[in-house]
Amino acid sequence: MRIPWNPANILSFGRLLATLPLILLILRSTHLSLFISALLFVVMAVTDTVDGRLARRYGWVSNLGIFLDLTADKVYTSAALIGMVAIGLLPSWIAIVIITREFIVAGLRSFAAAEGTVIPSDRWGKHKMLLTIIAIVWMLLWGSAGLAPGTHLTPFPAFDTYLILRLIAFLLPLGFWIMIAAVLLTVFSGYDYLRKAAGLFTA
């Protein structure tokens, strides 16, 4: 059996491997480690977009690629959320809602596929993912600045010295409210998936 290790699949697999250093950096919970974890998460999110485009453009779409892409998305996002809960940067109920929705949708799509029905990703799910990514990065930066309530870090002195950094310090807490918006969209998109698949449960 030939395994299609093309660049798109390598990016997806690399995203899976990068989950370990991501979670270790978050759990270390220092100014530097949280800042680096935010940068790493951005890189992982970018590769999440790039690998799919490469696969479609160059005809590298494969079952392995689809599996790696879908799995990596859920693994690295869930790991980041759990790590943020562990260091007190994120309320546990937010992570529970988002991760539970992922399990429900994944199970629903698997069930639909077994019944010969394909439930594609919709715009609400994509918007939810984008908001979640933005919120995670924003909150990691918030934590790296020592401003988040649960990180127990001393704020960088620069935030008390320079006007531009004071403005940044003021804006960083907005990441929490972006996360709340992501949770609301998560619930709505999960409901939308269930609504579309309702006919499968009455057959």
Image (cartoon, rainbow, N blue to C red):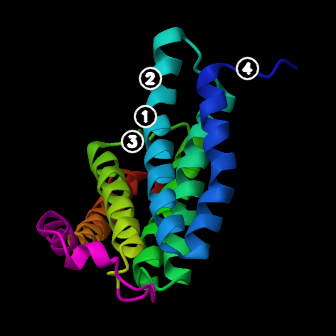
| Distance Cα–Cα, label 4 vs label 2 | 16 Å
Residue positioned 51% across, 44% down in the render: 44
Label located before the other in sequence (1 or 4): 4
- Do residues under tags 2 and 3 come within 8 Å of each other at their CB atoms? no
Q: Residues within 10 Å of mark 1 (few under 14, many from 20)?
A: few
| Distance Cα–Cα, label 1 vs label 3 | 14 Å
Quarter in which the N terminus is drawn:
top right
Q: Amino acid at mark 4?
A: Pro
Q: Which residue is mark 2?
A: 53
Q: Whole-percent x and y of residue 83? A: 56, 73
Q: Which residue is mark 4?
A: 4
Q: Is residue 115 visible?
A: no
Q: Nearer the viewer, residue 71 or 130?
A: 130
Q: Residues within 10 Å of mark 4 (few under 14, many from 20)?
A: some
Q: Amino acid at mark 2?
A: Arg
| Distance Cα–Cα, label 1 vs label 4 | 19 Å
Q: Amino acid at mark 3?
A: Ser
| Distance Cα–Cα, label 2 vs label 3 | 15 Å
Q: Whole-percent x and y of residue 42? A: 43, 48
Q: Which residue is mark 3?
A: 121
Looking at the rendered structure, the secondary structure element under dot 1 is helix
